[in-house]
Amino acid sequence: MEAPAPANTGWADLLAEGRLPRFALICLGIWLNAADALVTATIMPSVGAELGGYAYFSWAVAGFLVGAILAGASAGRLSEIFGLRLATAIAGLVLAAGCVLSAAAPTIGIFLTGRVLQGVGCGWTAGFAMVAIAVLFPERHLARVFAGVSGVWGVATILGPLVGGLFAETGNWRSVFWMFAIQAVIFSAATPFLLKGTVRSQGESGIPWLQLGTLGLGVAAISLADTMGQPLAALGLVAAGLAILALVLRIDAKAKVRLLPHRAGDLRTISGAGYAAMFALMASSMGLTVYGPAILQTLHGLSPLFAGYVVGVQALSWTFAAVAVAGVAGMVGERRWIRIGGGCILAGVALLAVVLHQAPLAFVILAAATLGAGFGFSSSLMSRRILGALSDEDRAIGASAFIAVRQTGGAVGAAIAGATANLVGFGTGLTVETAQATAFWVFITALPMALAGFLAAWRLSGSAVKA
């Protein structure tokens, strides 16, 4: 008897049978999430100059982040209640409304309100995109789909600062938000046609209000840590936020309507180890994102744009590495690359602690590339492994949690980096001495998170872990 032909897993098959338009819609949703945050960071000095909001820079980031995390975490349940088509279309309109509010804002208060709405809209669009990947694409294509998503993040990292810088130089920062509002409307209008055929969950569902409220409290505490002038108070808020996040897992494990998949807080399970790895590894990488540009400008004399692109090497290597492993098939290859990726992230953080404060620029670029490649090698395969272990009941909430878990890890990492930087004098003024101290200690304090993430990734890729 002739053996069956192996399933086609190439890019051509991925985009066949009507999947190309849906894949494009998913990429647009991810682009709106990634580019909005990156472009806004670049134009904030212009916003502050016109609206008098220099003291509220951190609030613009914190408001966006809280909205995005809560929306991303709730996306799975909302897609079950309203159906993926309707929920995704509404998400695009919420994002458009937030962009319009910020574009037309006469005061900093209204601008910040718009940023919160943008966070909610971005969190939903990205979360629903993850749900769409889980329910619309066969498992054989998941690694390539996630690699494509990584590519969108890489493009956004390159184009975001450039677009924001161009608009800032012309003094026309409001046009950035009008541009995103138009894209969000297009996204919303295309959704009913491109997500046709998806249906609501037939089972009982609901909104896990208690978990979402507790999660919001924890994320708010962590986000507020970035606004604290006292490093010890900031570290206290981070610790309190982490304790509240742990409480979310305890509440969710006993809840009738769950926010996360079954046993997501148990490191002995695939989902528990996977989410822990995503959270800790992302947290460990935030020092480069937050402080890399300022350190590079001070210690290496780079322009703001060039410094941003040196940091952007991380995103580019992430993209290239994700594409390189997109065709990996079989459990052995999947486990190997998850472990290699976790090891590269740990090595990248350690290298940055050694080279960023004193080594030539080429070594800094190498360390950033190692860090990014680690995410590229492991992230899409981690997501695929988690989805493959989830029941049909948990698939939507499990997929929507990917971005929320990583963003929460990013918020924790940024807050820890901020408190560390202020402890070594960054908050008192940027000099060669404070830049060197920050470049060293920010990554030293990130090493425990990197090690924890590596160990969780190793457990995720082990044969003893339970589904």
Image (cartoon, rainbow, N blue to C red):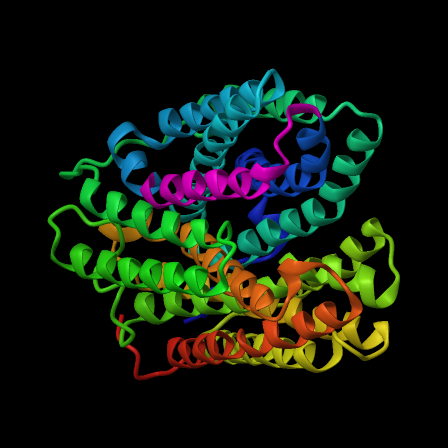
Residue 159 image point, x, y percent:
75, 42
**Majority secondary structure in the magenta region:** helix
- Image quadrant assignment for residue 3: bottom left
- Name the one closer to the observer, 339 or 124: 124
Q: Does the image show residue 6?
A: no
Residue at the image point whose x is 34% and y is 58% from the top: 241
Magenta stretch encompasses residue 68: yes
Q: Can residue 307 be seen in this view?
A: yes
Q: Does the magenta stretch include residue 421?
A: no
Q: Residue at x 62, y 20 (%)?
A: 103
Residue 252 in the image: state x and y as whole percent: 19, 55
Front position in the image: 317 or 164: 164
Q: Which x, y percent locates residue 101?
A: 54, 19
Question: Is 226 on the left or on the right of 1, as rendered?
Answer: right
x then y, percent, for residue 158: 75, 48
Q: Of residues 166 and 35, which is closer to you in this image?
A: 166
Which residue occupies 52% across, 36% down? 22
Q: What stretch is highlighted in magenta?
A: 50-74
